[in-house]
Amino acid sequence: MEPDALKNAVSTEAKRLGFDACRFAPAVRPPHSDAFLQWLQEGKAGEMKWLEKNADRRTDPQLVLPGAKTIIVLARNYAPQEGSPATPSEYQIARYAWGEDYHEVLTPRVRALEQILAAHGGQQRSYVDTGPVLERDYAVLAGIGWHGKSTMVISRDLGAFFFLGAVLTTLEIPPDQPAVDRCGRCTRCIDVCPTAAITAPQQLDARRCVSYLTIELKGSIPLEMRPLIGNRIYGCDDCAAVCPWNRFAKSSTEARFAAKGFHTSMLLRDFLSLDDAGFRELFRDSPIKRIKRRGFLRNVCVALGNTGTHEDLPSLHKAAAEPEPLISEHAFWAIQEIARRTQLAEGPLASSPA
Ligand code: SF4
Ligand code: SF4
């Protein structure tokens, strides 16, 4: 098959598999390789040591798939339906975790796309966010979108809420043109960040990012960062949500990305009564299961420390007696924070003359 005909066939199949965009980049060194290595060297990846371990592969697709010629970049929109059930105002979960785990939803589809390439003699490797590939760089090279100041890829058509997948293939397929940067003078994403994690346009200090602190960080959340996390219990997408390019995006047609029932039915303190089996059952299909009960309850304690009231204290005292030190330490902190806030609120009134 001629390269152009193969490109059409792959695009058609990607559309049939439900992808909103399918574009093609040459399998060259990612343009941000040097910046990525520098970022690692500066320690801004925090505890994400796996990024260092395979940094050589991330900056050379030939080490991932020898003979790779093309990287096919796929995008799937997860923008929630207008008026779809969100989390209660008591807490926030980032939109990418409202529905089923996107790795599980998209990986079989990306693998299915490999078949058409294999039938034409190609060798392939495919990834959805978990492989040694700088997917965002190739998404920009392929013209899915541009590197926003938030460091996310922003698309004219899809806005900021889409997942990426990548298929490396040894087949030569004509590349698409990169997209033009359309951030202009906008700085909304930088301004809205609750932790000042976007230190300059396209510069993220992951150690300050709520997504890192609540998902990637396995241990104790630094004390100075806890108040900044507010009521976010899994990830953060504030910088994506404010992007003005979302106004052109349509809602996702993927039912599996729709919000789960617990988003509207559970109070923050209810999560503290989950045992291991209860946690696994509640988050069976959700990406939240990745941080396990200890990580999730740690986050819930931080949110309660920032927003809870005396009504939450019985649940927090129970959590403080947990054998898991990560949970008990954060529960103690939350109890102290609630006590401090209560004293601040009641102190002057209680001591004022009648
Ligand atoms: S995800 Fe949240 S904390 Fe992280 S950079 Fe964006 S706005 Fe800041
Ligand atoms: S919010 Fe503004 S600056 Fe940030 S990525 Fe979107 S357009 Fe660019």
Image (cartoon, grey):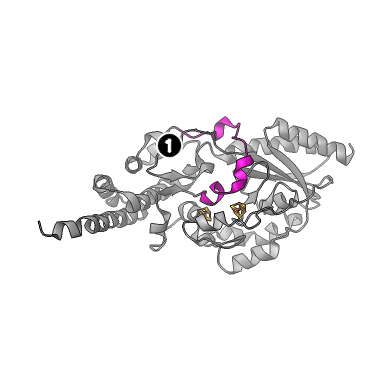
Magenta stretch holds residue 75: no
The image position of residue 264, as x and y in percent, is 40, 35
Placement of 49 over or under 247, stated as above or below: below
- Report the residue that reaches farthest toward the left: 354
Which region is colored magenta? 237-260
Which three-letter amino acid code belongs to the residue tagged 1? His
Which one is in front, 340 or 36? 340
* Closer to the camera in the image, 242 or 129: 242
Quadrant where the image shows the N terminus: top right
Secondary structure of residue under mark 1: helix
Q: Residue at x 54, y 49 (%)?
A: 242
Residue that sits furthest to the right in the current view: 2
Q: Is residue 4 above or below residue 66?
A: above
In the rendered image, which residue does mark 1 sit on? 263
Residue 119 falls in image quadrant:
top right
User: Where residue 115 sits: x, y (%)?
Assistant: 75, 35
Q: Can residue 276 be seen in the rendering of this structure?
A: yes
Quadrant of the rendered image containing residue 333: bottom left
Number of dots carrying numbers: 1
Q: Nearer the viewer, residue 158 or 19?
A: 158
Residue pictured at 40% horizontal, 53% vertical? 230
Q: Position of residue 137 (x, y in %)?
A: 69, 54
Left or right, 219 with respect to 197, comes to left
Determine the residue positioned at 59% across, 35% down: 251
Residue 311 lies in quadrant: top left
Would residue 258 be counted in the magenta stretch?
yes
